[in-house]
Image (cartoon, helix red, strand yellow):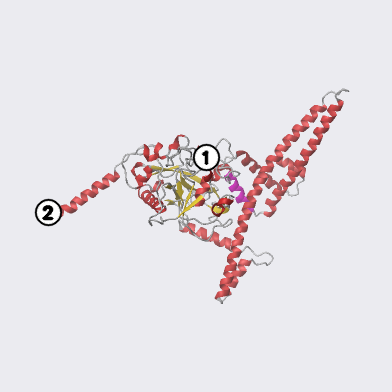
Amino acid sequence: MKPLLLMVPLMALLLASTSLNAQQAPVENWPLDLVDPGHTDVPADLMLPMPCGAAMAFQKVDVPVDVNDPLADRRVRLGQSLDQTGYSDYLRPAFLRGAFGDPGEGGGDEARTETSHYFIARYELTKGQYRALQGDCSPHSRADRLTKGGLSWFEGVSLAQTYSSWLYANAADALPRAGGVPGFVRLPTGVEWEYATRGGARIDATRFSGLTFFAGQEDQDMGDFALYLTPGGRGRLGAIGLRKPNPLGLYDVYGNAEELMLDVFRLNAFGRSGGQLGGIVTRGGSVLSSAQEIYSAQRTEYPPFNPATGDAQAGETFGVRLVLASHITTTDAKIRKIRDRWLALAAAPADTDNDIDPVTRLSVMIEAETDPRRELALSVLQLEFRRSRDRTQTALQQSARATLLAGAVFVQTLNASEERINEKVGRVRQIVALPLTVDNREMINRQIQSHLDQLEQMRGGQSTNLLSYRAALETLSADMPATVRDVAYRVLREELVLSGQVDLLLTLDRFWRDLEIYRAAPDINPEKLLLVVLD
C-alpha cells in the first residue's frame, strides 16, 4: 500500500504543476476591434490587460484643481432643471477630484499641471470581457464584442473585485499610481459618471449644462451616439462602439446598456441629496429607452433584490462601465500633508487689531468648558463657523474664476470694438476725401453725419466696456487674496487648454498681464488703460 499512497501526492503535485504551466502559457492577445473598436480614429488613453489575452480600454478624465492642495476639489453643477423629474435629477452642486495626478508625480517636487484625473472605461463591459473574468479562455469571436447585460449590482461589484485582484497579481505595473500605490477597479459614482458623460473639462463650459453633450448642434441627434428604442427596433443590447463617442472619447454613455452606479439612490430635495438612502441606480438609459428619456442627468432607481424571488435584481439591460480609482491616504507623507492642510484651514488667521477669530475663541472656550452639554453646543457652533468659512472660500474661488473669465472676454470685446471704430474712422475719411459738387454735397454731408453718430455710439459702448474691465481688474486686485487669484488663474488656464479654447486662452493671458500692470498703477487713467488693453 505504501507505494500507492506515495503516488497520490506525487500525482497531485504533477497535476498542480500541469495546471500552473497551463495558466502561465502565453495566450494570444485579442484583436483591438474586439476591445477598442474606436482605435482606428483615436487610440484609447490607457489599455489594461485582462485574463485570456483580452484587454479593457480606458479614457483619462481630467478634473482641473489645485493639485498642490490635498483638500482642493472641483465644484460642478450637475442635474437638470426639469420639473417632471426634479425629485431625482434637479440641479445640485457636486464636488469632484481625480484620484491621480499628485504633486511631484513623475519625480518632481511640484505638480506638473493643475489637473487631477481618473480613468473610466471607454466602453461598457462586453460579453467577451465578462467571459474572460470568469476564467473562460475559449477562442474569441465577434460575439465577444456585444455588451454584457443581465448583471446585478452585486455582480458588478464582484467583477470589479475579480479584475482588481487579477491586475494586482499579473499586471500591477500597468495600473496608474497615486503616491506610488497602484489603483484599483470599481463601479463609478454618479458624479464621476455624469461629469465624464457630459464631456468633463474637454467640452466648452457653456455646453456642459446641456441635456446632452451634443445639445444645440443641429447636425447631431441621439441616433448618432446611442442605441435606443426606435420603431421596429429589437430592443437587444448591441456591440460596443457602433456609434460616435462623446467629447472625452467614451462610447455608448447614452443607450445600449443602462450602467450600474456604485452609490445608491437618493431623492433631490431642491438642490441637495435627500436623507433617505434607497435602491440601486442606473444611468444613461438603454435600448429600451426612447430618445426623450435619455439625457446626462437621468437616473433610474431599482430595488436591489427582486421582490418576487429575493434574488439580486439583474435586469436584462443592466451593464457596467468600470473606473480606475485609488484610496486617498496612500502614504504617511500624504496623510501628514492632508492633516497639516486641514489644520491650517481650520486654524484662525493672524490677529488683526486684537480681533481674535471666532474659531480660535471657541477653541479656547471648548478647552476650558467643564459642562459636557455646553461643550457639545460650542463644538457644534465651531463646526458651523468652519463650514461657513469653507463655503466662503469656495465662493471666492468661483468668483475669481468668473471674474477672470469676464476679463478675458472684455479683452476680446474691447479689441474687436477698436477694430470696428478704426474701420468706421477710415470710412469717414474716405467720404471726406470725395470731391464735392453741388449735386452730391447734401448726400455726402448726410453720410458723414450718420457715420459720426454711429462712431459716437461705438465709442460710448467702448467706454462702458472699459469701465467694466476696470471693475474686473479692481475686484481681482483689491478684493481677492493673492493665493485665491493665482490658483483660480492656473486652474482656469488648464480648463481652457483641455477644452481647446485657444483664442480665449490667449486673451486670458493678456488679461492676466494687464492685471499685473493695473496692480502696479491702479490709478491709471482710462486712455492709458485702453492702450494697455489694445497693446
How many circles with numbers are drawn on the protein? 2
Q: Nearer the viewer, mark 1 or mark 2?
A: 1
Along the polypeptide, which appears first: circle 1 or circle 2?
2
The residue at the far bottom in this view is 370
Residue at the image position 65 percent from the left and 41 percent from the top: 507
Give the residues in magenta: 482-495
Examine the rendered structure and indicate whether residue 284 appears above or below residue 334: above
Q: Position of residue 252 (x, y in %)?
A: 47, 42
Q: 220 left or right of 533?
A: left
Q: Amino acid at mark 1?
A: Met
Examine the rendered structure and indicate whether residue 449 appears above or below residue 271: above
Q: Amino acid at mark 2?
A: Pro
Q: Which residue is mark 1?
A: 222
Residue 98 appears in view:
no
Q: Position of residue 487 (x, y in %)?
A: 60, 51
Q: Which mark is residue 3?
A: 2
**Disc 1 + disc 2, Cβ < 8 Å:** no
Q: Position of residue 455 (x, y in %)?
A: 79, 36
- Provide the major secondary structure of the magenta segment: helix
Task: Find residue 34 and report its image quarter.
Answer: top left
Q: Position of residue 219 (x, y in %)?
A: 56, 35
Q: Secondary structure at mark 2?
A: helix
Q: CA distance from mark 1 to mark 2?
A: 72 Å
Mark 2 nearby-residue class (10 Å; few <14, some 14–19, many ≥20): few
Residue 417 appears in view:
yes
The residue at the far right in this view is 438
- Quadrant, the N terminus: bottom left
- Quadrant, the C terminus: top right
Q: Secondary structure at mark 1?
A: helix
Task: Find residue 346 and report its image quarter.
Answer: bottom right
The residue closer to the viewer here, 487 or 210, is: 210
Examine the rendered structure and indicate whether residue 425 appears above or below residue 64: above
